[in-house]
Image: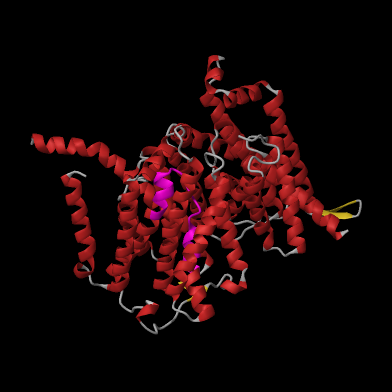
């Protein structure tokens, strides 16, 4: 890493750490933790979608499983929702294997179609299954019985928990990028046939990336439901949950370490702004905007802001040096 | 007798599934490109039919043609302005482009037409016919038969005509087709027009008998995926059989299990298909 990049990362980390001190209002903190949560799930998506180039459009299924399990465990056993997090992770791993094993036998768009179909299947099924609350969904403890329930009236603890998890996800991604496994992923993304002829086990590598991605997406879902204390089929498994991960990663730059974080900062701010301007009834407009942004990225800048920055930054440095 | 009626009803709806799925499979087979907005084309066809009836009047023939022609145009415009460019880009761009398009069209429809469920006014096709003891609404019978005729027509267009040969030549080998004096870009634009047009007319045919809202596109898009997977990518006859099978399975599962299960059964079938026979019933292993 160059010195400039290191300085940039330190600056970003400092801003994220100090944000709650600078903006202490409940609204600002809420937006802050929404940015972090979106960054966590988009970074998790990035592992399989960005680095391995396998575009999942149904990652909401892992998010939803992660979101449902803590509240389900709480409703059945009365244990703190936190106890459901590992169960959610385990189920997400199983789900990832069930989808990945057959879908990765074939190349191309197959995986995308499989993910969207399975996610929809789970969403509709959850909506009819009384045991998990059907269309109404599940609720967490209304009042925390202790710190372990993680129900804080203040936003600040959530903010720092999310920040900690995001740091872990980014660190794992960073190590992955540098590892042999990371080079396998890049090889698969650029030319699957060449990678396989060089002895990369394409199917297993993709599957490992999907499992790793599913684990972190599931954790993101758990964080969401523990914080809001509520989940229903739409907020857990809805197609827009999946879409948001894709658009945030693609906006910032799929396959780059900080792309999803940058994408999350931009998109969540934009979303907050449109919701404030257009009111509650403007949610339709938000999605029109989503669709428009996705189409524009695909048409003009498929590498996202990261590649755009890579292209223009040398010119910027040069002009500054010349001045 | 009731069971027989359920079966016939399912097949008639399945014929319409076959019609719009054959459009999706055409694009897939020709360009190895999956259109996530295909269900939205069906939905747009329904609203074009509604707008035609509301502002121009006329019967099913007029609004079906109007939906077909409008969507044919929309398909070509989308190819020229968007698809042609993202085809050269990475796969992420290809998937994002039609995925974003689907969101854009779906929520634009929500915004313009509201989320309310609407239906077309009564047409000349109202009434019930009695075919050998099976009671069928006239509108569903006509729509189903027209859909089968059009799907078979599309297949004949591809396999029996000069323009069809040129389309298939581009699908087979783009460069070789270019050397034969075929312009791939024009053929691909035509394929998008045909695909969107068939989705549009399928939408109009369904709108005669079924109420609809902007969210139906999502369901139809997934139905078309299942049909294309089941029938084999790129095969129009495959899409025809698959569409009929899906219609039948939906009708039977709604009859035996309850209406909410009809989509669950179809998606579960898709998941099972993924495991057992990912190349589809009629497709070749790749």
Residue B219 in picture, x, y percent from top left: 61, 53
Residue B215 versus residue A117: which sits nearer the camera? Answer: A117
In the displayed image of the protein, which residue is found farthest to the front?
A: A199
Q: Quadrant of the C terminus of chain A?
A: top left
**Does residue A51 appear left or right of residue B106 in this picture?**
left
Whether the magenta-drawn stretch holds residue A41 is answered as no
In the displayed image of the protein, which residue is found farthest to the top?
A: B180
Residue A184 versus residue B66: which sits nearer the camera? Answer: A184
Which residue is drawn at the image coordinates 75% and 37% (left, top)? B149
Asked if residue A167 is positioned above or below residue A231 in the image, the reply reads: above
- Visible in this render: residue B262? yes
Which residue is drawn at the image coordinates 54% and 57% (left, top)? A95
Q: Quadrant of residue A157?
A: bottom left
Q: How is the image coloured?
A: secondary structure
Q: Quadrant of residue B256?
A: bottom right
Asked if residue A188 is positioned above or below residue B217 in the image, the reply reads: above
Name the chief secondary structure element in magenta: helix
Residue B155 versus residue A123: which sits nearer the camera? Answer: A123
Asked if residue B280 is positioned above or below residue A29 in the image, the reply reads: above
Whether the magenta-drawn stretch holds residue A66 is answered as yes
Q: Quadrant of residue A317?
A: top left
**Does residue A300 appear left or right of residue A241 in this picture?**
left
- Visible in this render: residue A292? no
Number of marks drawn:
0
| Magenta segment boundaries in residue numbering | A44-68
Residue B168 in picture, x, y percent from top left: 62, 25
Residue A53 in picture, x, y percent from top left: 43, 43
């Amino acid at each position: 890493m160059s010195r400039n990049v290191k300085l940039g990362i330190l600056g970003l980390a400092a801003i994220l750490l100090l944000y709650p001190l600078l903006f202490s209002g409940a609204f600002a903190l809420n937006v802050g933790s929404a940015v972090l949560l979106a960054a966590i799930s988009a970074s998790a998506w990035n592992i399989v979608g960005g680095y391995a180039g396998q575009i999942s459009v149904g990652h909401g299924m892992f998010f939803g499983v992660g979101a449902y399990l803590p509240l389900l465990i709480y409703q059945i056993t009365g244990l703190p929702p936190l106890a459901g997090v590992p169960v959610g992770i385990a189920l997400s791993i199983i789900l990832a294997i069930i989808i990945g094993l057959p879908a990765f036998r074939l190349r191309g768009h197959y995986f995308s179609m499989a993910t969207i179909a399975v996610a929809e299947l789970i969403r509709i099924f959850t909506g009819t299954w009384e045991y998990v609350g059907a269309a109404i969904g599940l609720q967490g403890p209304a009042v925390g019985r202790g710190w372990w329930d993680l129900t804080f009236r203040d936003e600040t603890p959530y903010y720092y928990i999310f920040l900690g998890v995001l740091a872990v996800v980014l660190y794992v991604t960073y190590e992955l990028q540098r590892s042999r496994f990371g080079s396998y992923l890049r090889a698969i993304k650029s030319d699957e046939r060449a990678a396989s002829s060089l002895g990369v086990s394409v199917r297993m590598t993709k599957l490992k990336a999907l499992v790793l991605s599913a684990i972190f997406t599931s954790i993101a879902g758990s964080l969401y439901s523990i914080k809001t204390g509520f989940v229903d089929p739409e907020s857990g498994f809805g197609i827009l949950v999946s879409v948001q991960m894709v658009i945030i990663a693609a906006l910032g730059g799929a396959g780059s370490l900080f792309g999803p974080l940058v994408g999350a900062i931009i998109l969540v701010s934009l979303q907050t702004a449109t919701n404030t301007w257009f009111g509650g009834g403007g949610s339709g407009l938000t999605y029109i905007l989503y669709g428009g942004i996705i189409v524009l990225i695909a048409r003009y800048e498929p590498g996202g802001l990261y590649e755009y920055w890579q292209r223009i930054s040398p010119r910027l440095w040069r002009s500054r040096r010349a001045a | 007798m009731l069971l027989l009626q359920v079966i016939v009803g399912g097949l008639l709806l399945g014929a319409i599934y076959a019609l719009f799925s054959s459009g999706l499979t055409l694009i897939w087979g020709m360009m190895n490109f999956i259109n996530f907005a295909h269900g939205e084309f069906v939905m747009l066809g329904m609203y074009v039919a509604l707008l035609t009836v509301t502002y121009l009047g006329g019967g099913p023939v007029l609004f079906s043609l109007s939906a077909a022609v409008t969507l044919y145009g929309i398909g070509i415009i989308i190819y020229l302005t968007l698809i042609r460019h993202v085809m050269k880009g990475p796969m992420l761009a290809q998937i994002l482009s039609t995925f974003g398009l689907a969101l854009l069209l779906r929520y634009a429809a929500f915004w313009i037409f509201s989320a309310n469920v609407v239906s077309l006014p009564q047409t000349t096709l109202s009434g019930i016919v009695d075919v050998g003891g099976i009671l069928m609404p006239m509108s569903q019978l006509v729509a189903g038969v027209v859909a089968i005729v059009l799907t078979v027509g599309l297949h004949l267009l591809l396999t029996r005509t000069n323009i069809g040969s040129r389309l298939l030549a581009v699908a087979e080998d783009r460069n070789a087709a270019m050397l034969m004096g075929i312009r791939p870009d024009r053929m691909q634009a035509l394929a998008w027009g045909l695909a969107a047009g068939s989705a549009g007319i399928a939408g109009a045919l369904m709108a005669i008998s079924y109420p609809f809202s902007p969210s139906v596109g999502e369901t139809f898009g997934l139905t078309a995926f299942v049909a294309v997977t089941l029938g084999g990518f790129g095969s129009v006859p495959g899409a025809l059989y698959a569409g009929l099978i899906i219609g039948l399975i939906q009708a039977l599962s709604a009859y035996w299990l309850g209406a909410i299960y009809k989509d669950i059964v179809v998606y579960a079938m898709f998941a099972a298909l993924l495991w057992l026979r990912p190349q589809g019933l009629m497709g070749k292993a790749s």
